Image (tube, grey):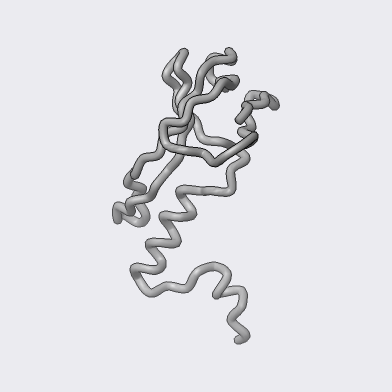
Amino acid sequence: MHIIPYRKFSTVLPIQGGRKEGWKMKGICPNCEKETELELIHRVEDIKVRGEAIKVEVKYYKCKNCGEEFEDPHSDEDSLDKAYREYRQRHGMMQPEEVRADPK
């Protein structure tokens, strides 16, 4: 994987294999703006949705130089969206794509 800087943001591009827990690579940290070793971290976090804590798995990169943790800004995974989907499922609410498909 490589991190390519683009206007204070970073892009993570897979080269070979998958992204694995604790996987280390070289890249540019958007915080310290230095080429350094980055580590992929998976963890479960609580995200509050309407006062209810929803556990969601999130992925971060951690800079070994400054310790900053950051998400891949171009990733398709959105932890807030996952939390709201889980909340709607728990409470029997429709998902956005179901609302759009409803032929009323």
Residue 16, percent from left and from top: 62, 36
Q: Relative to residue 89, is residue 15 depicted above or below?
A: above
Residue 48, percent from left and from top: 34, 50
Quarter of the picture containing the N terminus is top right
Q: Residue furthest left?
A: 52
Residue 18, percent from left and from top: 54, 41
State left or right for residue 59 relative to residue 100: left
Q: Residue furthest bottom?
A: 104
State left or right for residue 93 relative to residue 16: left
**Which residue sits at x=55%, y=74%?**
98
**Which residue sits at x=45%, y=25%?**
62
Q: Relative to residue 9, is residue 44 depicted above or below?
A: below
Residue 43, percent from left and from top: 36, 40
- The picture quadrant where one finds residue 27 is top right
State left or right for residue 91 relative to residue 64: left
**Which residue sits at x=39%, y=47%?**
57
Q: How many marks?
A: 0
Q: Residue furthest front?
A: 17
Quarter of the picture containing the C terminus is bottom right
**Which residue sits at x=47%, y=13%?**
65
- The picture quadrant where one finds residue 91 is bottom left
- The picture quadrant where one finds residue 54 is bottom left
